């Protein structure tokens, strides 16, 4: 016969397994989509907006907490190395005195939420989940080391400020709109200087300050027209690109000789 202690342990294990299974069955799930997965940019592109919409699916029709859900949407554009320089006025002119290299940082970074981030989750959760431009990892080369620094570092602050002035970094705490307790939408502004490449969109669902679930989607921005043809040719077929460049140079010289030909 089984001992009472062993029977209790088995019962507890079964109860725990049932609880976990029931919790998994009731877990929330995010269903999201973007209005256009492939955006074409022409030489005269002046900006636009992409729309992300979705829903929270769960067994129960609505959360028990009357405050409902919170959503944070983070859009991360193509990554590249960038440099921020510090200028000082010396002898009446502005000169570069110091610089800091940022390694593989997003060319575009936008954070959208349904209310202020500090009301959605505590600081430790925001740091862990990289919620907000303050907590998104921006790796720098600091001497021989590679690291992110404190949010109020002068170079980091200047880097974020300069990108924000061009509309490439932004944080909008009221951009996500809940149309119903479970249906939501938000717009993603794309400025004229938006980088070309692939974009990742991270959608994180919170309740009572804790992360409930998350999902991702993506879209792509591509350049069309003669400029894109030249860029693609240069990248994929260097010989043809070289011949085209030489031909264009010859034609330019020939046309210049005609225009400026003296009688």
Image (spheres, grey):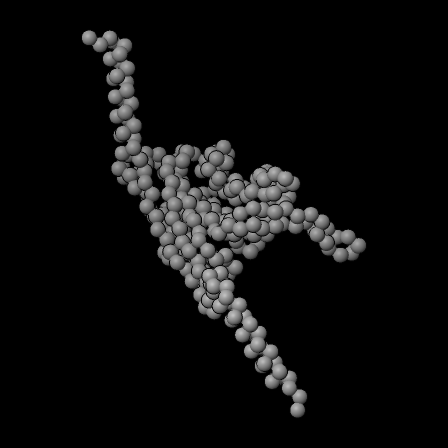
Q: Nearer the viewer, residue 214 or 3?
A: 3
Q: Residue furthest left?
A: 1
Q: Position of residue 56 (x, y in %)?
A: 32, 42
Q: Nearer the viewer, residue 244 or 206?
A: 244
Outermost residue toward the bottom? 263
Residue at x 37% of width, y 53% of height: 34
Question: Disc count in the image?
Answer: 0
Q: In the rendered image, is residue 43 in sight?
A: no
Of residues 229 and 249, which is closer to you in this image? 249
Residue 69 drawn at (x, y percent): 37, 39
Question: In this picture, is 50 found above or below 27?
Answer: below
State left or right for residue 65 relative to residue 112: left
241 to 191, vertically: above or below: below
Q: Residue 55 at what x, y percent from top left?
A: 32, 45
Q: Is residue 258 visible?
A: yes
Looking at the image, the residue that sits furthest to the front is 239
Q: Quadrant of the C terminus?
A: bottom right
Residue at x 46% of width, y 35% of height: 121
Where is 38 relative to 175, above or below? below
Q: Position of residue 155 (x, y in %)?
A: 63, 45
Q: Quadrant of the N terminus?
A: top left
Does residue 131 appear to the left or right of 259 in the view shown?
Answer: left
Q: Residue at x 54, y 74 (%)?
A: 247
> In the shown orientation, is residue 19 left or right of residue 197?
left
- Quarter of the image where one finds residue 262: bottom right
Corner quadrant of residue 224: bottom left
Q: Residue placed at 66% from the left, 48% from the top?
A: 99
Direction from residue 98 to residue 200 in the image, left or right: left
């Amino acid at each position: 016969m089984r001992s009472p202690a062993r029977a209790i342990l088995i019962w507890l294990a079964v109860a725990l397994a049932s609880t976990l299974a029931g919790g998994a069955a009731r877990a929330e799930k995010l269903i999201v989509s973007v209005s256009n997965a492939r955006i074409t940019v022409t030489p005269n592109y002046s900006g636009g907006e992409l729309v992300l919409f979705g829903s929270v699916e769960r067994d129960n029709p609505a959360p028990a907490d009357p405050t409902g859900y919170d959503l944070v949407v983070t859009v991360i554009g193509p990554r590249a190395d960038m440099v921020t320089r510090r200028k000082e006025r010396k002898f009446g002119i502005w000169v570069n005195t110091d610089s800091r290299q940022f390694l593989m940082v997003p060319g575009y970074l936008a954070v959208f939420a349904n209310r202020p981030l500090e009301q959605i989750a505590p600081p430790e959760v925001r740091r862990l989940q990289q919620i907000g431009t303050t907590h998104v990892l921006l790796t720098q080369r600091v001497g021989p080391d590679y690291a992110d620094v404190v949010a109020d570092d002068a170079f980091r602050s200047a880097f974020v400020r300069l990108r924000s002035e061009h509309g490439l970094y932004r944080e909008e705490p009221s951009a996500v709109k809940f149309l119903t307790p479970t249906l939501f939408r938000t717009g993603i502004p794309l400025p004229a200087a938006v980088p070309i490449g692939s974009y990742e969109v991270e959608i994180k669902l919170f309740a009572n300050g804790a992360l409930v679930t998350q999902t991702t989607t993506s879209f792509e921005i591509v350049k069309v027209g003669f400029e894109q043809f030249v860029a693609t040719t240069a990248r994929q077929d260097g010989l043809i690109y070289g011949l085209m460049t030489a031909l264009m140079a010859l034609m330019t010289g020939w046309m210049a000789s005609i225009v400026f030909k003296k009688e």
